Image (tube, rainbow, N blue to C red):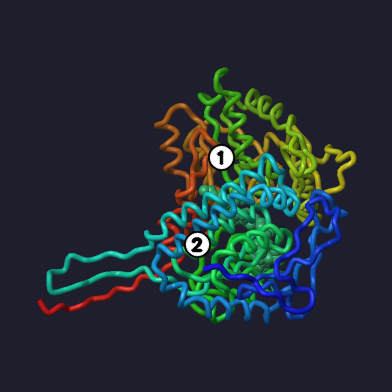
Amino acid sequence: MTSTPTATSGSTASSPAAIDPTGAAPVPDRPMLIGGEWVPSLSGEWADVVSPGRRGVVLARVPEGTEADADRAVQAAQAAFPAWAKLHFSQRQKALLKIADALEARVEDLAVLTAADTGNALRTQARPEANTLVNLFRYFGGVAGEFKGTVLPAGDDQLQYTRREPLGVVAGILPWNSPLMIAGMKTPAALAAGNTLVLKTAEDAPLTILLLAEICNEFLPPGVLNVVTGRGHVIGEALVTHPGVHKVSFTGSTRVGIGVGEKAAKRLAHVSLELGGKSPNIVFPDACTSELIDETATGVLTAMRFTRQGQSCTAGSRLFVHADVYDAFLEKLTEKVRALKVGDPLDEATDMGSIINQKQYDQVVNYIKDGKSQPNVRVLLDGEDFTADDLDGFYQGPTILAGVGNDWRVAQEEIFGPVLVAIPWTDRDDVIAMANDSTYGLAAYVWSQDLTAALDTANRIESGWVQVNQGGGQVIGQAYGGYKMSGIGREFSIEGAIEAFTQTKQINVKLNV
Ligand SMILES: NC(=O)C1=CN([C@@H]2O[C@H](COP(=O)(O)OP(=O)(O)OC[C@H]3O[C@@H](n4cnc5c(N)ncnc54)[C@H](OP(=O)(O)O)[C@@H]3O)[C@@H](O)[C@H]2O)C=CC1
Ligand SMILES: CCCCCC/C=C/C(=O)O
């Protein structure tokens, strides 16, 4: 199953040039992977990829892919589909498990490039994410035989069975905030089920996905995995509307996701949408005893994803703290969050790296200004106070606002930045109502030693994923996806992947017995 990418003309390469994460080397061109070959866009246009943590540094150039590139990637995936789909599952399994080993051998390269590409700190985010990618390939490789059907007990003269058949060509559209983890949810699952894939990278973080493609390409036949770069409204939309794409697996904002869903619906293409969130963190008084307050504060810090600059769809960014412990808990939490070291993503000492780009940075600042302008707000930590000294990137410190109303913009809209808003509560029914008073429903966090109260709360919260007394407890194999405007469909688990990446065929056979 090994395929060696072949060289083509112009600025293409037989194997892509290495990227220096500090930007010290001459800027390489990093082509796309289509049909097993590294190619520029047909237009010949390239786009610079700037490191968010080092604003002046261009890490590489990637092709500015257009509709024509989407088309040839889909054609390559279509051509590869029949042979890939009809393999015995164990052959797909073997390829995915070999990829897992190869990724593991390059895990540090993936981690360092992710830190440079996304601005996420190497130690706290990029390295764990690269390890999760390895584990996702191992998991979906391992369960490749589980994409299976059922047999009905219909009597000896009948064979009535279902097959879970692959859908065909899947388009996987990725965001920039955790590109490897999200590519890891889609790629091995879609391939294990027998589909072929076209991944579209986010404009702001394409490089780490191109390295993933380079590693995968060693073990897959040409066209089974294709990776294209370019703008969402150009090549992304071309994939969504392409008649050869049978499934769109999209992760990104709710705004774009709605448009993707509408376009896919027009031609009845399958679609999964993993979208935004504004997840509640509910702290009960019994989680703030003198023995527990420290652990709960650390958990809330983790759930808020401060160490990913809050750029997480599952960030527990609405903090509801019981009035009896409100001040004490916020004091403890603020002390911990203030201690986070903001800095160069490539520095091992850094807890919190850079925001992805100027637009996102400005959006976060605008939300902070809006929150600070509200009556009676208390600013416990102000990201605007952070000065980056010698750093030249989109750096910002964490912000914590107290005394916030659940109806304020900062409490209702997804900021996707390191901004936590704290709201007091006194009655369990009220806090559950406030938690559910949101258009989103992706994640939630409940902190209590009273399991009856905690589980009642968890059961009543309108979110696809609730964690109790932990903030970072994702387990490969669990269901993951949103309620309400946070999305449709589940990924990360085998059950979700079977639904997401296969269709059911029923076959009824009359036997001559
Ligand atoms: N539920 C989940 O699992 C997760 C959800 N998210 C959500 O993602 C958002 C942040 O990511 P961000 O990248 O800004 O999200 P966007 O929705 O802006 O973009 C996501 C992807 O869609 C592409 N895209 C943009 N427009 C179109 C279009 N018209 N047709 C097809 N594709 C398009 C983008 O390309 P381009 O980069 O070129 O614009 C990018 O690859 C947040 O809202 C966050 O909550 C993030 C991670 C996980
Ligand atoms: C089971 C949790 C999986 C989360 C994967 C995607 C996370 C995205 C984010 O935090 O932004």
Give above or below for 494 relative to 425: below
Secondary structure under tag 2 reads helix
Q: Residue furthest top?
A: 290
Give above or below for 236 relative to 267: above
Q: How many labels does the image show?
A: 2
Q: Which residue lies furthest to the right in this view?
A: 390
- Is 152 situated left or right of 53 in this image? left
Q: Distance between the residues labelled 1 and 2?
A: 30 Å
Give residue 120's position: percent from left, percent from top.
Answer: 71, 47
Give above or below for 10 relative to 332: below
Give residue 406's position: percent from left, percent from top.
Answer: 62, 43
Mark closer to the chain start, 1 or 2: 2
- Mark drawn on residue 472: 1
Q: Residue at x 74, y 38 (%)?
A: 348
Give residue 2's position: percent from left, percent from top.
Answer: 55, 67
The quadrant the C terminus occupies is bottom left
Q: Which residue lies furthest to the left in this view?
A: 513
Q: Mark 2 points at which residue?
A: 95
Query: What amino acid does circle 1 point to?
Result: Gly
Q: Which residue is drawn at 45% across and 38% down?
A: 457
Give residue 243's position: percent from left, percent from top.
Answer: 54, 81
Query: What amino acid does circle 2 point to?
Result: Ala
Q: Quadrant of residue 62?
A: bottom right
Label 1: how many residues lie within 10 Å, few (<14), some (14-19) or many (20+)? some
Residue 278 visible: no
Residue 311 visible: yes
Q: Which of these two is toward me, 441 or 426?
A: 441
Q: Quadrant of residue 411?
A: top right
Badges 1 and 2: C-beta atoms under 8 Å apart?
A: no
